[in-house]
Image: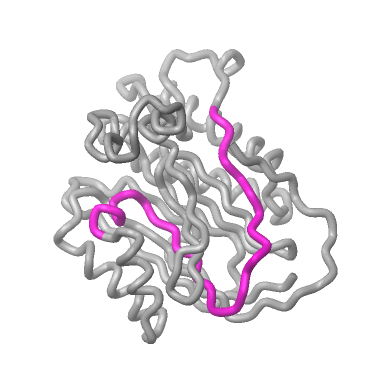
Amino acid sequence: MQIQIRLPYAFSHIGQRTTNQDALFPGGTADPQTQLFLVCDGMGGADKGEVASALLCRGIADYARSMGEPVFDIVHLQVALDQVYESYHEYLQEHPFVHRMGSTLALVQFHEHGVTVAHLGDSRVYQLRAGKIIFQTKDHKQVNDMVDAGIITETQALSHPWRNRLSRAVVVHAGENPAQTSHPIPDILVLDDVRAGDYFFMCTDGVLERVDNATLESVLGGDIPDKAKMAALIGLCNGQTQDNYSGYLIGIETVNQAEETTKPQVVRS
């Protein structure tokens, strides 16, 4: 499978916060030859969320370059994340007044088998076709786990006091022993149903303050250029969003099917 994307469009804005704790890779410099995209949202102002998200983006991108741009499977991703955890520990040791470092992760990678999607936390990845969402990641939040366990209903989750608590993210705490600490496994899968005209949209949760699924379908289903679609999404958030808001819009230009080789390992939770 050969997937050719159109020119991607990125945005990252501070919203009504004092710092922008979101990070993107590439940092707004993607082109139609780019294959790897990352959107990360750092956790906690006092805990240097802007550093955590930047280290996460840089760590995964550096790993990809050092390994010759491999197709990310669960093994490659875990090794890359282990290196990020090491960089977090080093930062905490050098800055004793920082007690925790953490970030969400959303990853999209285009390759010969399709599109790898991976995530930890509540930064999302969507796939849309003809103005309809055909895939989206499920947020790693405590309330979602409680709904799955039958403890609360989906309606109750919307107003639950824990609705913003993450159940999984890329996080380390000062003083923990790296050798004795287990970290959450990211959700990772390969989407092989990809067609010309599809969109992949990645975003931090600040975007979701103003853009729900129906709005996203309406904007991306419109008959306007990709740049105008991105401008419309930014316009909905501008001046209205409390949190930082960042994202990537990636349109699919062409898809040429080819004989399949062995697919990367897939993990679903």
Rendered-image quadrant of the C terminus: top right
Q: Name above or below for residue 175 compared with residue 170.
A: above
**Residue placed most toward the observer, 2 or 161:** 161
- In the displayed structure, 188 sits above or below 47; it is below
Position of 112 relative to 203 (above/below): below
Q: Where's the N terminus, which quadrant? A: bottom right
Q: Position of residue 74 (x, y in %)?
A: 67, 41
The image's colour scheme reads: one colour
Q: Left of 254 or right of it: where is 21? A: left
| Residue 111 in the image, given as x and y percentages of width and height | 69, 63
Q: Position of residue 91 (x, y in %)?
A: 44, 29
Q: Is residue 208 magenta?
A: yes
Q: Residue at x 54, y 52 (%)?
A: 107
Q: In which image quadrant can residue 218 be found? A: bottom left
Which portion, as a residue range, is magenta?
184-210
Q: Could you say which quadrant of the image residue 49 lies in?
A: top left
Left-right relation of 241 to 33: left
Is-magenta flag for residue 35? Answer: no
Rendered image quadrant of residue 159: top left
User: At 48% across and 76% down in the image, what residue appears?
Assistant: 130
Q: Is residue 259 left or right of residue 29?
A: right
